[in-house]
Image (cartoon, coloured by chain):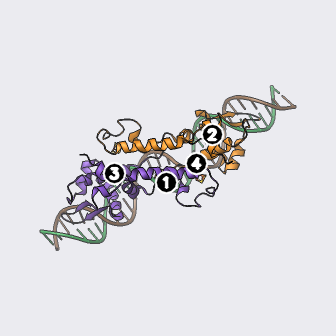
Chain colours: A orange, B purple, C brown, D green
Amino acid sequence: MMELTRKGDYAIRGIIYLASQPPNKISLLSEIATAVDVPQTFLAKIFQQFSKTGIVKSFRGTGGGFLLAGPPEDITLLQVVEAVEGPILPNRCVLKPGECERDLTCTVHPVWRQVQQQVRGLLGNITLKELTTK
Amino acid sequence: MMELTRKGDYAIRGIIYLASQPPNKISLLSEIATAVDVPQTFLAKIFQQFSKTGIVKSFRGTGGGFLLAGPPEDITLLQVVEAVEGPILPNRCVLKPGECERDLTCTVHPVWRQVQQQVRGLLGNITLKELTTK
DNA sequence: TGGCAAAAGACTTGTCAAGTCCTGTTACCT
DNA sequence: AGGTAACAGGACTTGACAAGTCTTTTGCCA
Ligand code: SF4
Ligand code: SF4
């Protein structure tokens, strides 16, 4: 259980590639896809999501491509994962009260909250900087 | 992401009901299903899995039903979840080396191991005893 | 041996993951 | 202005898996 999807994994691979490029060097989608071994059309979808959430910048036309929106040490793994996979929810009752009618009395409910916090804390402390191979 | 399935949630509900019964009191499937509000036929499948992994005992025929295999303080939430949902794997590369050909050089790989350990540790420290409403 | 209760297996329905493909939109370049 | 280089967006496909249901079999007890 709790498996990351391919999309999530590909997303991380792709953005790490960006992070390990020289600053301000624009990378082509085709270049990234080849480098991290992901189908280009699929990676396109992923980077569109990145672009919409604002963690990468995109440029069209000749000389276009992708660029990290900020310095690698400011972008966390949590941001990357949540950008493409949505919020981390070990159980649906964690999202908002009322999702499960038992949540008021349920003794397990707090456990999932705790799991969520732990995982978010962990991923939130890892930046792209730390993930680029040196 | 990382969502528990209905099956997992139902499983927990069901076994907590068992754990909160008086020791050695055999419970009928129909009784459990009604109490925790889960379709009986579906719960049947879940308890079959419990039975196979040995965390509950089952008896057929008249006077039959289900019984916790051990004292509630000896069964952890981790055991329950893994019994029906399979092992906790934040990413497929955590299972065994070779699942992803990048795992030797990948800088993210250790992160998922860490997530797995954290979650397992957390769930493994919670017993059914602590989850029964007092 | 009849009936009670769990076990097992086949089947259904819908959703979602993992892509592909095609068409649009924007920006540069001559 | 026209052509080409790139990303953006939408529709579509395929297969797996979640969430059940239904039916039959197996075991147990009185
Ligand atoms: S039963 Fe408890 S753990 Fe399960 S969804 Fe409801 S509140 Fe959450
Ligand atoms: S790329 Fe890294 S994190 Fe992703 S599956 Fe492979 S080893 Fe694991």
Q: Which residue is mark 4?
A: A9
Q: Earlier in the sequence, mark 2 or mark 4?
A: 4
Judge: label 3 CB < 8 Å from ligand 1. yes
Q: Identify residue type, mark 3.
A: Ile
For mark 3, give the secondary structure.
helix
Give residue A122's position: percent from left, percent from top.
51, 44
Q: Secondary structure at mark 4?
A: helix
**Is A131 displayed left or right of C17 in the figure?**
right
Q: CA distance from mark 2 to mark 4?
A: 13 Å
| Residue position marked by numbered label 1 in the rendering | B89
Q: Nearer the viewer, residue C10 or B87?
A: B87
Q: Residues within 10 Å of mark 1 (few under 14, many from 20)?
A: many
User: Residue D24 sits in which quadrant?
Assistant: bottom left
Query: Looking at the picture, do discs 2 and 1 lie on one chain?
Result: no
- Residue type at the position of mark 2: Phe
Q: Residues at badges 2 and 4 in contact (C-beta under 8 Å)?
A: no
Residue visible at 36% across and 63% down in the picture:
B53
Give residue A117's position: percent from left, percent from top: 45, 41
Q: Name the image quarter holding residue A64.
A: top right
Horizontal side of residue A38 vs B96, given as left or right: right
Q: Are marks 3 and 2 on the same chain?
A: no
Q: Which residue is mark 2?
A: A47
Q: Which mark is residue B12?
A: 3
Q: Nearer the viewer, mark 3 or mark 2?
A: 3
Q: Is mark 4 within 8 Å of ligand 2?
A: yes
Whole-number angstrom distance, CA of label 1 to CA of label 3: 19 Å
